[in-house]
Structures are given as structure tokens and as C-alpha cells.
């Protein structure tokens, strides 16, 4: 992974690096590897994640079809 530093702006490059790492899931994987997870706990976690993804996908599909109201965006 590579991030360019422009105009000696290290803070901006650091933010870009953190965003890339977040997208890749590096922080999440580090958190999971921090301690031992029993196989039964791993299965339960993965199943819960799959259910969450399926619900989110179904909710978005219903919103696109107009059966559910769209989520209100916060105005700035």
C-alpha cells in the first residue's frame, strides 16, 4: 500500500493511509487477531454478520423499490 506525501503535508497523507487501511479491513482483522476466538464463537459471529448483511441488502432493495421510505440525510 502506498500513499504519496504532497507539499510535506504528513497529516493529510496519514489520514489517507488510515482511510485506505480502514477500507481494506486491516484494523478489523487486527482486532480479531488480538485474542483467541473459539471456533463456535467464530461461527456465531460470522453467521450474525451474514444475517446483518442480508437484512441491509433487503432493506436497500425495498427502499429502491419505494416500499420503504428513504433514510433522511442530515443537512449541514
Image: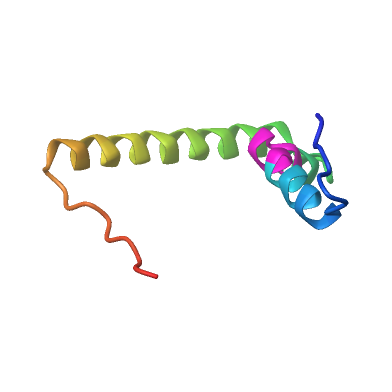
Q: Position of residue 44 (x, y in %)?
A: 57, 37
**Quarter of the image where one finds residue 67:** top left
**Depicted 40 relative to depicted 22: above or below:** above
In the current view of this chain or complex, which residue is farthest to the bottom? Answer: 76
Q: Position of residue 65 (x, y in %)?
A: 14, 36
Q: Position of residue 70 (x, y in %)?
A: 22, 52
Q: Please check the rendered image and state whether residue 25 is part of the magenta-colored stretch, yes or no.
A: yes
Tell whether 70 sits left or right of 30: left
Q: Please check the rendered image and state whether residue 28 is part of the magenta-colored stretch, yes or no.
A: no
- Which of the pair 43/7 is nearer the observer? 7
In the current view of this chain or complex, which residue is farthest to the front? Answer: 7
**Depicted 46 relative to depicted 34: above or below:** above
Number of on-image labels: 0
**Quarter of the image where one finds residue 75:** bottom left
In the current view of this chain or complex, which residue is farthest to the left? Answer: 67
Q: Position of residue 33 (x, y in %)?
A: 81, 39
Q: Which residues are magenta?
A: 20-27
The image quadrant where one finds the C terminus is bottom left
Tell whether 62 sits left or right of 9: left
Tell whether 70 sits left or right of 33: left
> Predominant secondary structure in magenta?
helix
**Quarter of the image where one finds residue 56:** top left
- Which of the pair 72/60 is nearer the observer? 72
The residue shown at (82%, 31%) is: 2
The residue shown at (37%, 33%) is: 54
Amino acid at each position: 500500500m502506498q500513499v504519496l506525501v504532497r507539499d510535506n503535508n504528513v497529516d493529510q497523507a496519514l489520514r489517507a493511509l488510515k482511510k485506505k487501511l480502514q477500507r481494506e479491513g486491516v484494523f478489523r482483522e487486527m482486532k480479531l487477531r488480538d485474542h483467541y476466538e473459539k471456533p463456535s464463537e467464530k461461527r456465531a459471529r460470522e453467521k450474525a454478520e451474514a444475517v446483518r448483511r442480508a437484512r441491509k441488502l433487503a432493506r436497500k432493495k425495498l427502499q429502491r423499490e419505494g416500499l420503504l421510505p428513504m433514510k433522511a440525510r442530515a443537512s449541514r
